[in-house]
Image: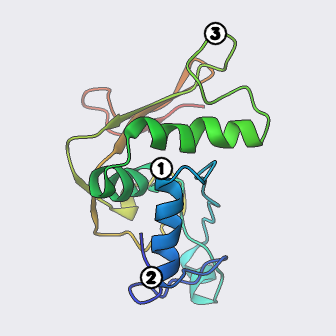
Amino acid sequence: WFDDSTCDYRVNPPIRAKADVEYLIAAIEDGDVDAIATDHAPHSAEDKAGGAPGLVGLETAFAVCYTKLCRGRGLPLSTLSRLMSQGPARILDLNKGLLAEGYDGDVVLVDLEQPFTVDPEEFAGKSRNTPFAGLSLYGRVKATVKQGRLTFSELEPGNGPQQTP
C-alpha cells in the first residue's frame, strides 16, 4: 500500500521504495507470488513510542489488499482469495484454504461494495498501531467462521461487533 516516500512507519522488513512496491505488485499480477500473509505485530502505543517495529496487520489485511489490488489494479477476487487462504495453508501444510469436503470449515464474509474508514478504536484486538487510520477501504470483514463456528460477527442486529470464544 505504502512506499518509503509516503509512510515512515517502522516495521520489519522495512517499507520499501516505490519501485520495489511496484515490482512486488507486478509479481502478484504475473502469478509469481504464492501467498499474501501478515506478521500481525500488535504493539502498545508505549512500545511504538519506544521504537518497537510492527503494526496491526490482521485487522486491515484483506481490505488493504482488496482495495489496492482488486479495485485498484483489477486483480480477480478469486486470485486474492487464493493468495490469502489457499496459498498460506499450502505452505504451512494446513487443512484449510478451500471450501471443499475434507477441509476445515473456515469462511470470512466481507462487504465488497460499501467503503469504510479505518478506525483503530473499532479493532477487535487490543492494539491500535496502524498507519491505515482514517483511510477509506473496501472489503470490511462482517463475520468469520472457524471450523464451522461463528467467531466474529457484525451481522447480529443491534449488537455491534462481537467475538465469540
Q: Residue at x 59, y 14 (%)?
A: 100
Q: Are marks 3 and 2 in contact (CB under 8 Å)?
A: no
Mark 1 or 2 closer to N-term?
2
Q: Is residue 5 above or below residue 107?
A: below
How far, Cα to Cα, is label 1 from label 2?
31 Å
Q: Which residue type does callout 3 highlight?
A: Glu
Q: Which residue position holds label 3?
A: 101
Where does the image place residue 9, in percent across and percent down from the top left? 51, 83
* Spatial CA span between label 3 and label 2: 42 Å
Q: Quadrant of the N terminus?
A: bottom left
Q: What colouring method underlies this structural image?
A: rainbow
Tell me which amino acid carries mark 1: Ala
Between discs 3 and 2, the one toward the N terminus: 2
Q: Residues within 10 Å of mark 3 (few under 14, many from 20)?
A: few
Q: Quadrant of residue 92?
A: top right
**Residue at the spot 62% in from the left edge and 35% down from the top edge:** 86
> Tags 1 and 3 in contact by the CB under 8 Å rule?
no
Percent position (x, y) of residue 97?
A: 61, 30
Task: Give the image location of residue 55, x and y in percent.
Answer: 55, 70
| Viewer-side label of 3, 2 | 2
Left-right relation of 157 to 8: left
Query: What is the count of numbered marks?
Result: 3
Residue at numbered disc 2: 18
Contact between marks 1 and 2 (CB within 8 A): the answer is: no
Q: Which residue is mark 1?
A: 124
For disc 2, the neighbor class at 10 Å (few under 14, some 14 to 19, many from 20) is some
Quarter holding the C terminus? top right
